Image (spheres, rainbow, N blue to C red):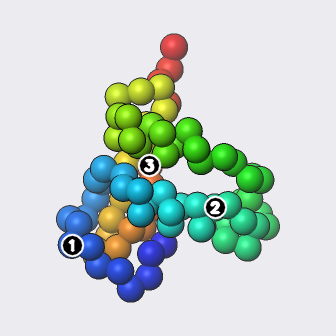
Amino acid sequence: MRKGVSDARPPGPSAVTEADLDVFDAALQSESGATPHQWFGFTPTIALREALRTRGLLAGADNMLAVTVDGELAGRVEWLERR
């Protein structure tokens, strides 16, 4: 996902950063970034950024971790609270 950037993060899941959200926006907020077969339209990310600032995108109804492989951001994993 993030080419040529090594931020020395260990492989596997880690806390999402503001820079990670920027990468996700670039990849998912356009049809060309996500491809025509998996694009779900424009989704506002203001709520994600607010959740990152207030609770680190953890311990809420919607949660997210970044996934790193070889020091590069590879994607994310999300889970939702089930009631």
Q: Which residue is mark 3?
A: 77
Image coordinates of residue 43 in percent, x first then y, are 69, 48
Q: CA distance from mark 2 to mark 1?
A: 24 Å
77 to 59, vertically: above or below: below
Instruction: Please name whichever residue, 37 or 73, is drawn nearer the observer in this view of the structure.
Output: 73
At 73% from the left edge and 73% from the top edge, which residue is drawn?
Answer: 32
Q: Nearer the viewer, mark 1 or mark 3?
A: 1
Q: Is residue 57 above or below residue 81?
A: below
Residue farthest bottom in this picture:
4
Q: Is residue 79 visible?
A: no
The x, y position of residue 6, in whole percent, is 29, 79
Which residue is at 50% across, 63% downward? 22
Marks 2 and 3 sit apart, C-alpha to C-alpha, by 14 Å
Disc 1: CA contacts within 10 A as few (<14), some (14-19) or many (>=20): few
Secondary structure beneath dot 1 equals loop
Relative to 5, does residue 81 appear above or below in the rendering? Answer: above
Asked whether the beta carbons under mark 2 and mark 1 sit within 8 Å of each other, the answer is: no
| Residue drawn at point x = 58 percent, y = 44 percent | 46
Locate residue 71 relative to residue 46 in the image: left or right.
Answer: left
Identify the residue under disc 2. 28
Q: Amino acid at mark 3?
A: Val
User: What's under tag 1, amino acid-wise?
Assistant: Ala
Name the residue carrying label 1: 8
- Label 3: few (<14), some (14–19) or many (≥20) C-alpha neighbours in 10 Å: few
- Judge whether residue 74 can be spotted in this image: yes
Q: Does residue 63 appear to the left or right of 31 in the view shown?
A: left
Residues 70 and 31: in front is 31
Q: Earlier in the sequence, mark 2 or mark 3?
A: 2
Tell me the residue at 27%/73% (across/down): 7
Of discs 2 and 3, which sits in the foreground? 2
62 versus 75 height, above or below = above
